[in-house]
Amino acid sequence: MSGGTYRSVLRAPGVRWLLTTSLVARLPAAMTGLAIILRVSRGTGSYATAGAVTASYVVGAALLGPVLGRLADRLGRRPVLLASGLVNAAGLILLSLVPVHDSSLLFGVSVLAGASTPPVAASVRSLWPELVDAATRDSLFAVDSTLQELTFVVGPTLVALIGSFAGSAAPLVASGLLGLAGTIAVIAHPAVGRRTQHEHRKGTARVLSRPLAALLAAISLLVLGFGALDVGIIGFAGAHHASSQAGLLLGIWSLGSMVGGALFGTRATTGGARSLPPLLAATGAGFALLVAAPNPAVLYPLLLLAGVAIAPSLGCIYGLASRLAPASGAVEAFSWLSSGILAGAAAGAAIGGLIVQHLGSRIDYLAAAGAAVLAAGLTLALPRDRVVAATDLDEARAPI
């Protein structure tokens, strides 16, 4: 994928606006988990409790994500994004006010806020095939995945800065307001409000095919590793009296992913089913290398290296999904992947919290590496010779 191809993709009508505004709308995905962990761990002294509350937030989002995606396919993207964005912002602000020792209220509000997460990423990704031709679709997904890593550089840094100057509750408020502002900017674009021929359709036909289910399982396992590492890195920083560096450590990890995405994007990304298993395996190897870090200073370069294969892996997954998703359920299909991400993050946060609490960060790194390698194994079953067209899957697909 040449630099000229990147420029061609970014010149397509609507692409730059939707990329920019959706990145703002996706910032809560990079802020909320860390914001919850910092607030709850500081208030209770327990990383396990902090991980469990974070898990409740992402479980709520994972359970309702496909429902909101299906509603967006049927009713239109704009009304669903606006309604869910308003509720989500209110929920995050309320979560910043809930006493951390009132566990019932804390978990209840966390689930509600998560369940109302607007399907911004799924909605925007479902638009990419409409805005660019098939020849440059992979390029756009590569750009999307690479730029998304900006949120995981900026988001944790914002949490660290806001938390340092305004207290541990303030990052949750900032996350809600930034997410709402970005969502409103996304829905302002005419393409988001454009009605499709599928919006009037009723019924409950399943969107997932077997290959899509394999991608869903793989991305869930991969992000399980991410969620575990989030807690492990924070715990490692705390154990070395460097809690203030937690956001920077997470940010450098995402910077590595951006570098990897940019480098991978200089080559053709067609044949993603062939590239995906080795990329996931490389991610697992990078996670395992973190065990060698004796202190945060050494962890920085190792995290940079560990992130290199992440954006290319995600770009391959989304590019494959765009070909496998039925046209009548594109937002729902991408919402399933988003739910897989959230479910993996929930499990990873909970598992990571327990491992860090009882076994330490180094065992947590190895668990994350194992999850990525298992994801690589699952993707070996994906078809290599061809990718079934989404239009074909509308009429003939193998439901699970």
Image (tube, rainbow, N blue to C red):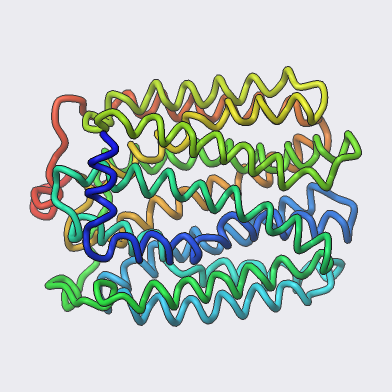
Can you say whether 290 is above or below 97 in the image? above
Q: Quadrant of residue 358?
A: top right
The picture places residue 269, in percent across and down from the top left corner, at 26, 32
Q: Quadrant of residue 76?
A: bottom left
The picture places residue 245, in percent across and down from the top left corner, at 79, 43
Depth check, front residue: 5 or 247 = 5
Would you say 352 lies left or right of 132 here?
right
Task: Determine the residue positioned at 22% across, 46% down.
Answer: 137
Can you say whether 179 is above or below 321 in the image? below
Depth check, front residue: 163 or 107 = 163
Q: Name the quarter where the N terminus is drawn.
A: top left
Q: Quadrant of residue 75?
A: bottom left
Would you say 106 lies left or right of 24 here?
right
Report the label total.
0
Task: Determine the residue positioned at 35% across, 66% down.
Answer: 17
Task: Determine the residue positioned at 33% across, 36% down.
Answer: 316
The picture places residue 28, in percent across and down from the top left corner, at 58, 62
Would you say 6 lies left or right of 244 here?
left
Residue 210 seen anywhere in this rendered image of the structure: no
Task: Determine the residue positioned at 22% across, 64% down.
Answer: 13
The picture places residue 92, in percent across and down from the top left corner, at 65, 72
Residue 122 seen anywhere in this rendered image of the structure: yes
Would you say 34 lies left or right of 146 here?
right
